[in-house]
Image (cartoon, rainbow, N blue to C red):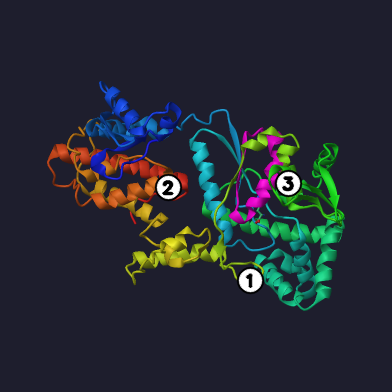
């Protein structure tokens, strides 16, 4: 419940008394007064508690706080030990999960990066983490892909991803005015679903080509998966789900399709289990997949890192699981994020991820070689408030603002300070010379990414004030300890986020 007071001279933390006031039927300022009075004696790292309005403002004893935080941050134990919060617990993280037979585009990147960071965060927290790529490797897009291949390409095209994408785009251009082609695509997928071996052989070839391509990219991004059990894996695991829904009397037939009415659970759109033509669906596979994960890995929790456009899907999924009697559905979470605008594979209007990574590298290099400085266009609040955002090169690669390169340059800056100050750090250095507000700002804690950015901002604002080189020994050693601690924390944090901490940049 702790917050930070609006002005630094009011204190470092504030405890709001409003919730207690309701419970105790007492005015918040009165409660604040009582707490502040009782908070005397040894307050550990605090040196004062003052009531102000409905808040108790708490001040940190800066000397003791600095000492505790900096020793902890630079201790050897801290560098090696993971924490024990997740001991004995298993968590499955479903992330990246692109629809294959299409190139990986920037939209998939978000799930991959957020999911990859979650994998590393939970690992540091001591959980057993199963990274799952629920590959979209089954579905009508394969019918379209095969139809495009047969009509406009040659068999070898199935082994080259860029050719496959070209044919996929071509299919959609022609299909708009050619109903026969649409019919061919439908027929190919129907053959695939009924086990026709020509269709299945083509499907497998296309799937392998796509997966090889994705795995190369994952390697480049430094993310890992324990399993690639995608949609096709559940082809023979959906009957059980449908039988169960029938046995529990949940399934009803509507217009020839099998559905589960979710209106009693507050969801207006029914869950579609089976289409009229017998082909099964995304949701049914996800129900089968969740059960499979729960049974196979014994996971206590499944996290789905998927764009916010699928919020309804996940609400339906969790509700269906619950109705089927799986209490653990309570611990399934949809971690959603805004969509990247202006990119659709169908129109071929994608920025390929590989090109993105190459371009990012080249732009960063150009920037660092001191070429034309790219000005960062900060979005106005309205734009930021929108869930969707527009992909912007300058923002993506910027060395300023809330970006990876900004964090990286903070780490490299400290490395430079430590390299050039001509001192060896003394682990027993006293911290009492650290009195500047710039110094205090460097040992304030919060949530990871924001925290690191705040730390990086603090660092960038501090090093001209907190000089090490040429300072009197006690002061120099204290600052050196401070910078060593900040470097250690940046290093761990960056590594968790999947960003490489560099010594120079
Ligand atoms: N393949 C889907 C898409 O690109 C995302 C799958 C997410 N995971 C899941 N279990 N549904 O839209």
Main SS category, magenta section: helix
C-alpha distance separating marks 1 and 2: 33 Å
Along the line of sight, the residue nearer the viewer: 176 or 417: 176
C-alpha distance separating marks 1 and 3: 38 Å
Residue at 36 percent across and 33 percent down: it is 28
Quadrant housing residue 307 = bottom right
Q: Which mark is residue 449?
A: 2
Nearest to viewer (mark 1 / mark 2): 2
Quadrant housing residue 364 = bottom left
Please tell me how crowded label 2 is: few (under 14), some (14-19), or many (20+) other residues with Cα within 10 Å. some
Q: Which residue is mark 1?
A: 348
Along the line of sight, the residue nearer the viewer: 82 or 358: 82
Comes first in the chain, label 1 or label 3: 3
C-alpha distance separating marks 3 and 2: 39 Å
Nearest to viewer (mark 1 / mark 3): 3
Comes first in the chain, label 1 or label 2: 1
Question: Bounds of the magenta span?
Answer: 290-319
> What is the quadrant of the C terminus in the image?
bottom left
Residue farthest toward the bottom in the current orientation of the protein = 177
Residue 165, compared with residue 255, is above or below; it is: below
Nearest to viewer (mark 3 / mark 2): 3
Q: Please provide percent x and percent y for residue 100.
A: 68, 59
Indicate yes or no whether the magenta region holds residue 110. Answer: no
């Amino acid at each position: 419940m702790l917050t930070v007071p609006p002005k630094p001279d009011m204190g470092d933390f504030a405890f709001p008394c409003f919730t207690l006031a309701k419970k105790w039927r007492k005015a918040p300022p009165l409660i604040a007064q009582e707490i502040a009075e009782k908070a005397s004696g040894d307050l550990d790292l605090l040196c004062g508690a003052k009531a102000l309005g409905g808040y108790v403002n708490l001040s940190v004893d800066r000397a003791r706080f600095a000492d505790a935080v900096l020793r902890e941050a630079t201790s050897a134990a801290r560098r090696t030990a993971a924490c024990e919060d997740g001991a004995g617990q298993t968590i499955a993280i479903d992330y990246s999960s692109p629809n294959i037979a299409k190139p990986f585009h920037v939209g998939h990147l978000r799930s991959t990066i957020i999911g990859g960071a979650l994998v590393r965060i939970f690992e540091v927290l001591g959980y057993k983490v199963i990274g799952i790529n629920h590959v979209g490797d089954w579905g009508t897009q394969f019918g379209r892909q095969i139809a495009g291949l047969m009509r406009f390409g040659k068999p070898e095209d199935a082994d080259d991803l860029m050719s496959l994408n070209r044919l996929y785009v071509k299919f959609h251009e022609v299909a708009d005015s050619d109903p026969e082609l649409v019919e061919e695509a439908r027929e190919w997928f129907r053959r695939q679903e009924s086990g026709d071996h020509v269709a299945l052989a083509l499907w497998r070839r296309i799937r392998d080509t796509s997966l090889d391509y994705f795995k190369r990219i994952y390697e480049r991004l430094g993310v890992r998966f324990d399993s690639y059990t995608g949609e096709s894996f559940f082809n023979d695991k959906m009957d059980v789900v449908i039988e169960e829904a029938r046995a529990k009397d949940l399934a009803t037939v509507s217009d020839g399709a099998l559905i589960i009415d979710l209106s009693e659970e507050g969801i207006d759109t029914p869950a579609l289990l089976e289409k009229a033509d017998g082909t099964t669906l995304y949701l049914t596979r996800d129900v089968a997949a969740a059960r499979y994960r729960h049974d196979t890995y014994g996971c206590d929790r499944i996290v789905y890192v998927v764009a916010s456009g699928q919020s309804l899907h996940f609400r339906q999924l969790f509700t269906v699981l619950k109705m089927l009697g799986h209490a653990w559905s309570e611990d399934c979470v949809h971690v959603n994020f805004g969509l990247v605008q202006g990119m659709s594979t169908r129109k071929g209007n994608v920025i390929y991820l590989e090109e993105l990574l190459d371009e990012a590298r080249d732009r960063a290099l150009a920037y660092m070689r001191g070429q034309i400085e790219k000005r960062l266009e900060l979005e106005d609040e309205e734009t930021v408030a929108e869930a969707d955002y527009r992909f912007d090169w300058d923002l993506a690669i910027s060395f300023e603002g809330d970006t990876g390169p900004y964090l990286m340059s903070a780490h490299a800056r400290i490395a430079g300070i430590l390299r050039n100050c001509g001192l060896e750090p003394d682990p027993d250095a006293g911290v009492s010379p650290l009195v500047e507000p710039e110094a205090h700002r460097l040992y304030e804690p919060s949530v990871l990414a924001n925290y690191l950015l705040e730390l990086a901002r603090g660092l960038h604002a501090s090093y001209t004030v907190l000089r090490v080189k040429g300072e009197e020994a006690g002061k120099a050693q204290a600052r050196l300890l401070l910078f060593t601690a900040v470097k250690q924390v940046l290093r761990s944090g960056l590594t968790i986020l999947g960003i490489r901490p560099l010594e120079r940049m």
